[in-house]
């Protein structure tokens, strides 16, 4: 429901971001607008024999032995601290609202499995349930607790003192946007004056890489790594896995103004629409994507003519880019060809469960600075995608309203409409 005189306007007062380009808003914004890439050869594990040997791994945070959940939590800590510090809300360890956390699906990873199997004398017929039971007590309790879905949210809630039961969610690549939507809805319903929305994903391990490779979803353009991600280009061949985290402090506009907070932007609308066509492919008629964008615009009380910039899902897979283009053209008509669109994934890769929040942060920074980061590697336009892709160099533009799209596997679609200032 769009904000009315009785529905609180939701403001953003704090932002935090971390990607393979670096930690913090300043470093990421500088490198994004310079067209730098954080994609590189994987050094975390051997890649001999693999079709894809590159990723946007976050190597400047050391986790030994490597654990995806541990890395995810450390990144979430850093972006939450940055966002809360900028917001200046509450006191240290006493955040005055709930926590919504988007995380990757959690499981016992292969290094943990090998440790547990060896110590418990398991044979080759050991099942995953056997491993869970073995990990749930005694010397492996730490592994069990770390590999629970709620572990990241529980630890963040304890550290930052959020209120109520923390909410963990996983809606594939739309997860980060879903976490923001939950925060918006809680404030609009009057359940809280503030919310901390976080998304994190540190899941680049051999098993995850091989799974996506078996889906033929990953780019195999390994050399040079920084040229691999090519959203909307005719020669695109897949996405590049990446890690990162994003955090937003949301408040009702009235609450933020009453305490003298700086308003960084407004979450004007949230839209979603499920697509049950296929586990990985989009419905060929594009209706769920079209409906998702239209729902977000309606929630914001805006028309397609109001949008000045689109931060797309823009993964660089042949299927996703084609379907997103069809959806954008259906919603915006001929004007779609003149609305600037640029994909951050060309530089930072696809941060998976974190993408919706990471890209919302980047969109809000674009609105703040009135500058659009480029889509790098856009050298061979696809004539079937007649959009105004911002190519290779950042572009200054007059921006008031923007939309950020997140379209996940399994048809989990969320679009966010963001504004530079209160309207």
Image (cartoon, rainbow, N blue to C red):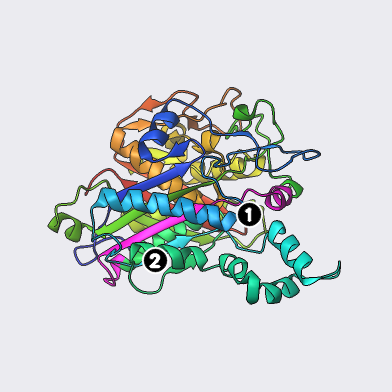
- The residue beneath circle 1 is 283
Assign a secondary structure to mark 2.
helix
- In the rendering, at what x and y percent does residue 153 appear? 46, 65
* Residue 241 part of the magenta segment: no
Quarter-of-image position of residue 41: top right
* Residue 211 part of the magenta segment: yes
Assign a secondary structure to mark 1.
loop
In-image side of 348 versus 402 (left or right):
right
Closer mark to the observer between disc 2 and disc 1 = 2
Which of the pair 349/305 is nearer the observer?
349
Question: Going by the picture, which residue comes out furthest to the right?
Answer: 124
Quarter-of-image position of residue 26: top left
Which of the pair 95/93 is nearer the observer?
93
- In the rendering, at what x and y percent does residue 57 appear? 58, 41
Up/down of 236 relative to 191, above or below: above
Q: Residues within 10 Å of mark 1 (few under 14, many from 20)?
A: some
The magenta-colored residue range is 187-212
Residue displayed at 41% across by 45% down: 17
- In the rendering, at what x and y percent does residue 308 appear? 35, 38
- The reply to whether residue 194 is in sight is yes
- The reply to whether residue 302 is in sight is no
In-image side of 263 versus 240 (left or right):
left
Residue displayed at 85% across by 69% down: 123
Q: Residues within 10 Å of mark 2 (few under 14, many from 20)?
A: many
Q: Which mark is residue 157?
A: 2
- In the rendering, at what x and y percent does residue 148 appear? 57, 69
In-image side of 241 versus 37 (left or right):
right
**Earlier-in-chain disc, 2 versus 1:** 2
């Amino acid at each position: 429901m769009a904000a009315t005189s009785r529905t609180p306007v939701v403001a953003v007062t704090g932002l935090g971001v971390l990607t393979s380009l670096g930690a913090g808003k300043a470093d990421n914004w500088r490198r994004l607008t310079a067209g730098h890439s954080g994609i590189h050869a994987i050094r975390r594990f051997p890649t001999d024999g693999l079709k894809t040997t590159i990723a946007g791994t976050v190597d400047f945070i050391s986790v030994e032995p490597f654990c995806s959940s541990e890395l995810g939590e450390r990144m979430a800590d850093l972006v939450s601290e940055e966002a809360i510090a900028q917001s200046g809300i509450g006191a240290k360890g006493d955040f005055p609202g709930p926590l919504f956390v988007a995380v990757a699906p959690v499981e016992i990873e292969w290094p943990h499995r090998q440790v547990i199997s060896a110590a418990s004398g398991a044979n080759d017929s050991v099942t995953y349930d056997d491993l869970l039971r073995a990990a749930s007590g005694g010397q492996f309790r730490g592994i069990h607790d770390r590999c629970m879905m709620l572990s990241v949210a529980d630890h963040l809630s304890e550290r930052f003192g959020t209120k109520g039961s923390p909410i963990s969610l996983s809606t594939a690549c739309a997860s980060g946007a879903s976490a923001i939507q939950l925060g918006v809805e809680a404030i609009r319903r009057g359940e809280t004056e503030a919310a901390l929305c976080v998304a994190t994903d540190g899941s680049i391990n051999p098993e995850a890489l091989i799974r996506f490779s078996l889906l033929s979803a990953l780019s195999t353009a390994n050399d040079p790594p920084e040229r691999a991600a090519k959203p909307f280009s005719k020669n695109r061949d897949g996405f590049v896995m990446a890690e990162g985290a994003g955090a937003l402090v949301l408040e009702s506009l009235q609450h933020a103004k009453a305490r003298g907070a700086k308003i960084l932007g407004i979450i004007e609308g949230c839209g979603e629409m499920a697509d049950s066509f296929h586990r990985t492919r989009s419905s060929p008629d594009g209706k769920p994507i079209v409906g998702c964008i239209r729902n977000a615009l309606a929630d914001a009380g805006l028309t397609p003519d109001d949008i000045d910039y689109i931060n797309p899902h823009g993964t660089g897979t042949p299927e996703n880019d084609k379907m997103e283009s069809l959806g954008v053209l259906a919603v915006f008509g001929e004007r779609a060809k003149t609305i600037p669109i640029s994909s951050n994934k060309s530089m930072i890769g696809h941060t998976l469960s974190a993408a919706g929040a990471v890209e919302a942060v980047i969109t809000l920074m674009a609105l703040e600075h009135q500058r659009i980061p480029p889509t790098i590697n856009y050298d061979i336009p696809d004539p079937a995608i007649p959009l105004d892709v911002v190519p290779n160099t950042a572009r200054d533009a007059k921006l008031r309203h923007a939309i950020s799209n997140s379209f996940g596997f399994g048809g989990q679609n969320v679009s966010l409409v963001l504004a530079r200032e209160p309207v």
